[in-house]
Image: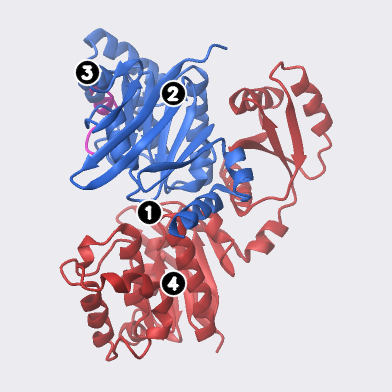
Amino acid sequence: MKHVKSITVENLTKIFGNFTAVDNISFDVEQGEIFGFLGANGAGKTTAMKMLCGLLMPTSGTARIAGFDIYKESEKIKRNIGYMSQRFSLYEDLSIIENIDFYAGIYGLEKKEIRNRTNEMLEKLNMKSIKNEMLSSLPLGWKQKLAFSTAIIHKPEIVFLDEPTGGVDPITRRGFWELIYEYAYSGMTIFVTTHYMDEAEYCNRISMMTEGRIAALGTPAKLKSDYNAIDMNEVFIKIAEVKRK
Amino acid sequence: MNTVVEVENITKTYNTTCAVDNINLSVIKGEIFGLVGPDGSGKTTLIRMIASLIKQNSGKIKVLGFDNVKDYKSIRKVIGYMPGKFSLYQDLTVEENLTLFATIYDSDIRTNYHLIEDIYSHLEPFKDRQAGKLSGGMKQKLALSCSLIHKPELLLLDEPTTGVDPVSRRDLWKMLKKLINFGITTIVSTPYMDEAALCDRIALFQNGRILESNSPNEIIGKYENLLYKVKSYNNYLTLQALRRFSNDSLVYPFGESLHLVLEKNDSGIDLIQEYIKKQNIGLVSFELIQPTIEDAFILLMQTKNSEIL
């Protein structure tokens, strides 16, 4: 299998006044990889992610997202990525189909294309018969799957997931990850930011940020063995404690 | 009397939604009792009824012998309650919030400082900062300090670790463990399965009902099925292959690997391994392992669901 990079980041830095939020980070994400981007609150995750999504200009360093340069082609980046957050993705007072239409429109799809992809999606999610139901009446797990599907309705190369499965039951959570596996296998790159360590365990590789830097990067298995830890939770604590000393 | 909280046949509905559906449980003095389950499973509603903040439609709750409806004033004197949503005064400083809570209960910060010392010491350097300007983890630590400063007999914590990073979570749990030494009983709700193992006893919540209530070890001990950890190069392909082998086998992603559940007398693992070998998906290993609370929860949910069907 040929390895194509969906994301390449080199020496990326963001300074606000005299505060360095992101301090010279470098990493790559391969196409079809599920990449976990972890760190405590205030470690610089959000700032880094905003730069990767083309929403914030870096102070220095370079990055290419889906083949586009973050300085010169931020509009193209926005059209070629999807974004899903557990909290603000969908409108509770719109129906399922209205939510889908709305997102498809935002991503600039043609009318005919919208119809095709909406049908395709309703079919896949098994929501055809309930497409006119208000979102607020759906169980959380269904909302999550729908939120993910609308985030990728324009078939982006990369999708950013922000704490996608917090607060759901173990079976629903696994249903969601199975969906993610399926899309990753078909070649979509999945970039997950979270501070839930058990979500991190589902990723192929993980980077751990502390104080603006990437303190560790590797597969969950490698990080666990490097830090002699039983789970990612312990890895996180050990990395944070090294910092404290 | 050893029982601190007695919940009997409690039901609570909001309009047409049944939030808590005929629940029974009892909490013993000095234990950490965990209400474990996803959002919307009834944990918060139950805590609010125990705290005497809302009334049930039917059933009975006794807290330290007091009735949660009739004796609500007595209950409020002996409990400490930390809601899931940050509810302190954002425009008061850290110290002002703590003083306020102590004063309401006719106490002061010094009297029970030993109870909160471990976590409040992290906050002390910021004692003049407005509560609204603290980070998420700091807010939780302050809220917990405020709920403890009057030395309650029963501490009710509604998802104290949600949105908190692993280091602060660990600090918080260390402190809860220490409270046992002071005879304080704790009821804590959490959506995190890994925190279940830190409780003395837990109740697993799903759709307003309790699937199982016991100590974590006993819940795991009751797990009779065979559980295999399945490691492979590609979880997605392996999952598909296992489902092809048998439509009704219970197999699910579990972190880096998959978990496969077989009936306790099922000797089919050899057949499965043989089948998987022929699927051209690389090396796949099967290891018989001990279940976690999460595996137990999944099996219980699965069993309940098929009972309904």
User: What amino acid type is highlighted by mark number 3?
Assistant: Lys
In the drawing, does residue A72 fall left or right of residue B299?
left
User: What amino acid type is highlighted by mark number 2?
Assistant: Thr
Residue carrying label 3: A72
Residue B67 x/y as whole percent:
40, 82
Identify which residue, B13 or A192, lies in the foreground.
A192
Label 2: how many Cα within 10 Å (few below 14, some 14–19, many 20+) = many
Task: Find out whether the residues at labels 4 and 3 contact each other: C-beta distance under 8 Å.
Answer: no
* Residue A107 appears in the picture as rendered: no
Label 4: state its secondary structure: strand
Residue carrying label 1: B163
| Chain A representation colour | blue
Of marks 4 and 3, the one in the foreground: 3
Label 3: state its secondary structure: loop
Label 2: state its secondary structure: strand
Are the residues flagged by discs 4 and 3 from a single subunit? no
Q: Which numbered circle lies on residue B235?
A: none
Residue B277 x/y as whole percent:
77, 21
Are the residues flagged by discs 2 and 4 from a single subunit? no
- Residue range in magenta is A92-101
User: What amino acid type is highlighted by mark number 4?
Assistant: Gly
Residue carrying label 2: A189
